[in-house]
Image: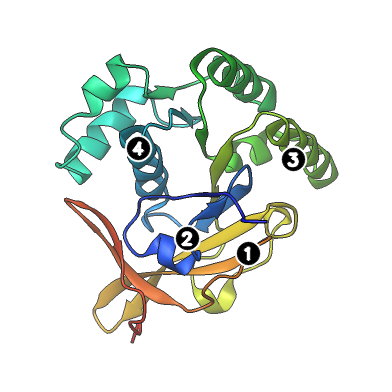
Amino acid sequence: MVLERVKTGIEGLDKMLNGGIPARRHVALYGGPGCGKTSFGFEYIYRGAKAGENGVYITLEETPDEILDNMRNTFPMMSDVDSLMEENKMEIAKPDKLGIEGVAEILEDRIVNNEAKRVVIDSLTIVKVMTRDIADYRQTLFEFLSLLRNLDCTTITTVEASKISKESVEYEIEHFVMDGIINLYNLDRGDKRIRALEIFKMRGTKHSRDLVPFKVTPSGIKVYVGEKVF
């Protein structure tokens, strides 16, 4: 049986994923500030819209207008974002309620009424800090993943890392319960910082385990498969 995959459309990443994310799986982008989580998530939704797969980007922190302004500046090649949004091929939404319930309401509506196949949630950390304790958060996360698995969508969720260096990464609940984890880093190299990523896990498929550099360029994210970070 051939595994159904969802191509991210991000240069180099699909090669590392052996063709793309397994369909209907739920992946976390895990990293510190400034490592490119929002850019990865937005490009995933944009590339899907261009390929005919409707998507919704759910923001729990910034406003939709702030996300759009930042992404237009980051990716000048996305000059057709407005027309894609007018055609309901992609959408940026912020729930009225910041908890899982608010996210679930948007998801169920957009997936049922707009046939959204790609979802980004930015970020799950907001839900974590609003939850009373770690046991409650774990239970909430399990229930939310169960909902997602019934909605026929492939999801990327951003998660803030408590420590930003590769050597000091602490494994969080998300590392254990999500279907996939892509760790993003800002690594020191003399007087510069190098962005790098590794696919920490991806259930149900073989994938590269290399640590590779990437850049956020005006024409999209480029993952340099086969290159060394240092």
Crowd rating for badge 2 (residues with CA inside 10 Å; few <14, some 14–19, many 20+): some
Instruction: Indicate which disc residue 19 carries.
Output: 2
Identify the residue at horizontal 72%, vertical 39% (top origin).
Answer: 145
- Whole-number angstrom distance, CA of label 2 to CA of label 1: 10 Å
For the residues labelled 4 and 3, say whether their Cβ atoms are less than 8 Å apart.
no
Does dot 4 land on a helix, a strand or a loop? loop
Can you identify the residue that label 3 sits on? 141
Choose the circle earlier in sequence order: 2 or 1.
Answer: 2
Does dot 3 land on a helix, a strand or a loop? helix
What amino acid type is highlighted by mark number 3? Leu
Can you identify the residue that label 1 sits on? 205
Front of the two marks 4 and 3: 4
Give left or right: position of 71 versus 26. Answer: left
For the residues labelled 2 and 3, say whether their Cβ atoms are less than 8 Å apart.
no
Choose the circle earlier in sequence order: 2 or 4.
Answer: 2
Does dot 1 land on a helix, a strand or a loop? loop
Can you identify the residue that label 4 sits on? 51
